[in-house]
Image (cartoon, rainbow, N blue to C red):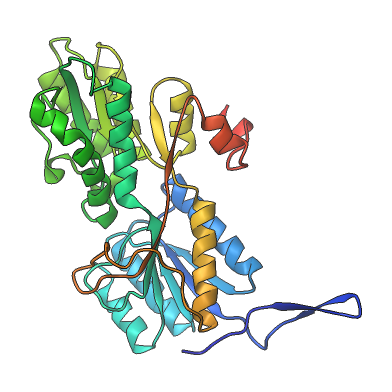
Amino acid sequence: MKKGLVMATATLAGVMAISTSAFAAKVGVSMPTKDLQRWNQDGANMEKELTDAGFEVDLQYASNDVQTQLNQIQNMISQGAEVLVIAAIEGSSLGEALDMAAENEIPVIAYDRLLMDSDAVSYYATFDNYMVGTVQGTYIKDTLDLDNADGPFNLEITAGDPGDNNARYFYQGAVDVLNPYIEEGKLVVKSGQTEFDDVATPLWATETAQTRAENILSTNYADGSNVDAWLCSNDSTALGVEAALAANYNGEYPIITGQDCDILSTKAMIDGKQSMSVFKDTRTLASQVVKMVGQIINGEEVDVNDTETYDNNVIVVPSYLCEPVFADINNYKELLIDSGYYTEDQLQ
């Protein structure tokens, strides 16, 4: 692999001098779509931090089209990318591009979504996906006081995209917390839909989540019974559930979980329509990936903190996991506004 030298600073006789290499290392960044707010933020954060670190950046969005993403990554390789950072639309669909990267000895960092079925994945950087689900499940457990309350309470589940490997981790983390209460009968899933394949939402689409939620409500809750909690794996699916509740539900409003702290869902949280959202500060993740890119380019040991969990069906991918937290009505100002992630005007 070619090694581009990043910018360096030196002080001589009290004067700061900037020295640049003959060329800056080129980094290809492939994001899945602009349709979800979080990917726009991730891409912008990544591009800024990489540029500030002295890298040349080729940032592309694939409009949720796998063939487009495949072509974009292949073009990045042809145009001299020395490291690739890829947030896949579907983790198993980029084999041709990954093979091309391997042939050209280009390291690949899977960003937030694990790249599956390939040994050409060098590293994985993400938040602890299983912990995301654990945080959501624990929020429901604690808010309903399941260890002490008599129940029973009604629960429904809306999970994420079956093409996104992370979705199963989110689902499993939450279900592992809640299953003992389901088995005990303290939590009741009236729809009977508890398996991942039954509750998954292709492409995390709000409209798909809404349609399924409307069907669940009309079939199981038309008698006026309450949904006490609705486990949603992310904010876009939560918005779909919230729309279905607004149109088809007359009971007491349920606990609704989410993930990403998107602006619309944060506003819904402020308005009492969503209970919480798992906050994954993409600035933290972008900074870690930029650090990893620099370590790769400079031939240094790359920071990882998990070498056992993320098996992509071919290899266990060395990973760096950032820790998620949750925002709700009680702490969103501290987490989201005071930290500079949003301004107050954005949440008006």
For this view, does 114 lie left or right of residue 321?
left
Q: Is residue 164 visible?
A: no
Q: Is residue 206 visible?
A: yes
Front residue of this view, candidates 16 and 309 = 309
For this view, does 104 lie left or right of residue 20?
left
Image location of residue 157, percent across then percent down: 21, 34
Quarter of the view holding residue 222: top left
Query: How many numbered circles are shown?
Result: 0
Image location of residue 236, percent across then percent down: 35, 39
Question: Which residue is rendered at x = 62% and y = 31% of the image?
Answer: 344
Image location of residue 312, percent across then percent down: 23, 67
Question: Which residue is rendered at x = 17% and y = 21% of the image?
Answer: 154
Quarter of the view holding residue 118: bottom left
Question: Which residue is rendered at x = 65% and y = 66% of the image?
Answer: 52
Q: Quadrant of the C terminus?
A: top right
Front residue of this view, candidates 137 and 202 = 137
Front residue of this view, candidates 37 and 255 = 255
Image location of residue 175, percent across then percent down: 20, 39
| Residue 271 higher or lower than 235, as above or below | above
Question: Which residue is rendered at x = 49% and y = 36% of the image?
Answer: 263
User: Residue lying farthest right?
Assistant: 13
| Residue 245 higher or lower than 305, as above or below | above
